[in-house]
């Protein structure tokens, strides 16, 4: 909720649309307008298709990559989150360490055949990716969060993925469900200057309502059109609520507000202030920590080590994080256990209240 809850302009747009229809299972004016806005904003998108959730979008882009390339295997990064599909639930949060590229299922009910088609690599390890690509000629795509949860890509890593995909003729997928329209108006693609072949978008484009999208070049997206590619290469994609006009109206107004001059400067200023409030209090108390992520999306790891991938991005003492977040809640500040999302709704008063709660939380953990 990048604009906060109940933003008056978003509410007005939704209320204006409600009497005109809530869902049609068909194209509608607001959906078309939103698609046009996305194509204008996001570098890799020439065409988009809507779905109801980010998990749906990630499922479809994996299928799309396979349809386009004629190959089956997908390379993903350990700890990367791409929804609830069988492929996405491979090595999302494995409890046990195994040798790469073995995939570890994080859910019951997933056939072994799915694991056999997934290759797992450590994030920020370009050499490991290069080895896997040289050893397997049946990889359809690499799927990655350009900011993996809150782990920042090392310098040159994303460009290296782009170059390796080009070299081996495979597709690069950016999961921008979270980073799209958050890191910048054009998402991580704009912020980092790296253009994937396919991307997924969600969260912000629905303005708080269920909506997500996938986008790519017209050539790749033609696999959703049976009349162009034929029955064998056609990818069926249907959803009753996909691109519904309520979510599209909310999303349109949300990104309209974000496009206004100064919106992202203010968002980053709020993020910097939230980072400073926490890091200064923790530094003063001598509590080892790392602030990981981007000013628009970050969190704290209570560790003195560097956080480069799933295995190193962890708390030295997980109890510290539990106590810290619980103390913040007791003082009226609700924070996710694993991510902090700055919002344009945060006021100076909110920041002062947060500062007080952080000071109390830091005092508490420094005594334990």
Image: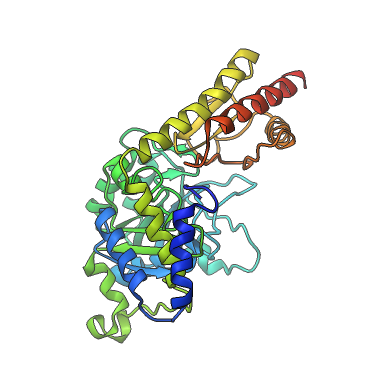
Regarding residue 302, the answer to whether it shows in the image is: no
What colour scheme governs how the chains and residues are painted in the rendered image of this protein? rainbow
Q: At 75% across and 23% down in the image, what residue appears? A: 364
> Looking at this view, is 207 or 336 the one in front?
207
**Could you tell me residue 342's position as x and y percent?**
50, 39
> Looking at this view, is 341 or 355 the one in front?
355
**Could you tell me residue 171's position as x and y percent?**
30, 58
Q: Is 226 placed left or right of 56 in the picture?
A: left
**Could you tell me residue 37's position as x and y percent?**
29, 60
Q: At 77% across and 22% down in the image, what residue appears? A: 368
Q: Is 338 placed left or right of 80 in the picture?
A: right
- Vertically, is 249 above or below 274? below
Q: Is 239 placed left or right of 355 in the picture?
A: left
- Vertically, is 297 above or below 305? below
Q: At 59% across and 67% down in the image, what residue appears? A: 110
Marker count (numbered): 0
> Looking at this view, is 110 or 296 the one in front?
296
**Could you tell me residue 77's position as x and y percent?**
46, 49
Please identify the residue farthest to the right as the structure is shown.
368
- Vertically, is 335 above or below 43? above
The quarter of the picture where residue 109 lies is: bottom right
Regarding residue 88, the answer to whether it shows in the image is: yes
- Vertically, is 267 above or below 238? above
């Amino acid at each position: 909720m990048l604009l906060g809850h109940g933003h008056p302009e978003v509410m007005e747009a939704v209320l204006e649309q409600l009497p005109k229809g809530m869902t049609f299972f068909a194209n509608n004016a607001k959906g078309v307008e939103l698609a046009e806005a996305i194509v204008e904003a996001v570098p890799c998108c020439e065409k988009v298709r809507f779905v109801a959730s980010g998990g749906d979008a990630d499922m479809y882009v994996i299928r799309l990559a396979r349809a386009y390339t004629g190959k089956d295997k997908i390379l993903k990064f350990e700890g990367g989150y791409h929804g609830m599909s069988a492929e996405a639930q491979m090595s999302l949060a494995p409890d046990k360490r195994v040798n790469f590229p073995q995939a570890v299922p994080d859910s019951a009910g997933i056939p072994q055949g799915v694991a056999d088609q997934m290759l797992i690599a450590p994030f920020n390890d370009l050499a490991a990716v290069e080895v896997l690509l040289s050893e397997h000629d049946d990889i359809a795509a690499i799927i990655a969060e350009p900011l993996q949860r809150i782990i920042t890509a090392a310098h040159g890593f994303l460009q290296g993925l782009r170059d390796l995909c080009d070299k081996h003729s495979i597709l690069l997928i950016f999961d921008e469900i979270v980073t799209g329209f958050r890191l910048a108006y054009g998402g991580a693609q704009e912020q980092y200057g790296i253009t994937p072949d396919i991307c997924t978008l969600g969260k912000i484009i629905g303005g708080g309502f269920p909506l997500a999208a996938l986008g790519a070049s017209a050539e790749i997206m033609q696999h959703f059109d049976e009349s162009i590619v034929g029955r064998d290469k056609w990818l069926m994609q249907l959803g009753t609520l996909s691109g519904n006009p309520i979510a599209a109206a909310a999303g349109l107004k949300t990104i309209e507000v974000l496009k206004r001059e100064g919106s992202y400067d203010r968002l980053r200023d709020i993020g910097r202030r939230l980072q400073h409030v926490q890091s200064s209090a923790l530094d003063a108390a001598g509590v080892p920590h790392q602030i990981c992520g981007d000013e628009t999306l970050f969190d704290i790891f209570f560790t003195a080590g560097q956080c480069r991938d799933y295995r190193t991005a962890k708390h030295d003492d997980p109890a510290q994080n539990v106590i810290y977040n619980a103390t913040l809640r007791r003082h009226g500040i609700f924070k996710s256990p694993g991510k902090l999302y700055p919002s344009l709704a945060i006021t100076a008063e909110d920041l002062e209240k947060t500062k007080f709660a952080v000071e109390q939380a830091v005092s508490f953990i420094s005594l334990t």
